[in-house]
Image (cartoon, helix red, strand yellow):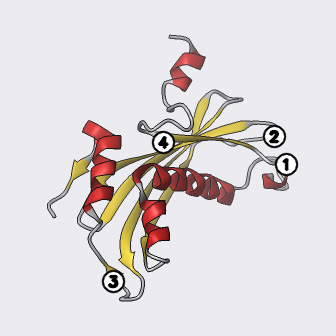
Amino acid sequence: MSGHDAFDSLFAPPDQPIAPVTIHQRVAWGELDALGHVNHTVFLRWLENARFAWFEHVGIAAAMHASGGQLGPILARVVCDYVASVGFPDTIRASVQCVELGRSSMTLRCQVGSEAKQQIVAWGELVLVWMDYAAGRSTPLAEPIRAAIRALEGAALHERGR
């Protein structure tokens, strides 16, 4: 397997309902800092964009809309390990996969890859909690969403007791 094929194998094709959910995004000139590389905060935005694509695949985006903003996820924890810098021009691939599902929480693993460098440039882990915003507390994730997460993630998913 060539280096390019090995890199490609780390990411799913964009817009495909398979894990991990992957987006491609061009690096914008305005994302560079004074040292000529992408500012570290932009990586978190890329993870957010990939996370929302994952939300669309598993029905979370639709559930948020259907509830009129009453229910939705809240970001409880984010970790990002930066491996290499990203410059311009480049296109990144950011992917998200749910690896743990609890009663009202989920842990997502993420990675960002540089097409120009053909390597992973950052790893991340996110913990989300499904919230009833009006009540101000967590609430169990609806079974249709849980089923969609199970179907998408398959054997990679670990479910904690509910």
Instruction: Tell me the SS state at disc 3.
Output: strand
Estimate the x, y position of residue 111 in percent, counting from the top left: 51, 43
Q: Earlier in the sequence, mark 3 or mark 2?
A: 2
Q: Marks 3/4: CA distance? A: 28 Å
For label 1, the crowd category at 10 Å Cα-Cα, with few meaning under 14, some 14 to 19 and many 20 or more, is some
Which residue bears the numbered disc 1? Answer: 29
Q: Earlier in the sequence, mark 3 or mark 4?
A: 4
Q: Mark 2 and mark 1 in contact? Answer it, CB < 8 Å.
A: yes
For label 2, the crowd category at 10 Å Cα-Cα, with few meaning under 14, some 14 to 19 and many 20 or more, is some
Q: Amino acid at mark 3?
A: Arg
Residue at screen point 43% across, 75% down: 67
Which residue bears the numbered disc 4? Answer: 21
Which residue bears the numbered disc 3? Answer: 137
Which picture quadrant has residue 85?
A: top right
Which residue bears the numbered disc 2? Answer: 88
Instruction: Tell me the SS state at disc 4.
Output: strand
Q: Marks 1/4: CA distance? A: 25 Å
Q: Marks 4/2: CA distance? A: 24 Å
Q: Marks 3/2: CA distance? A: 42 Å
Residue 8 against residue 140 in the figure, above or below: above
Q: Earlier in the sequence, mark 3 or mark 1?
A: 1
Estimate the x, y position of residue 140 in percent, counting from the top left: 26, 71
Q: Amino acid at mark 2?
A: Phe
Q: In this view, which residue lies farthest toward the left?
A: 161
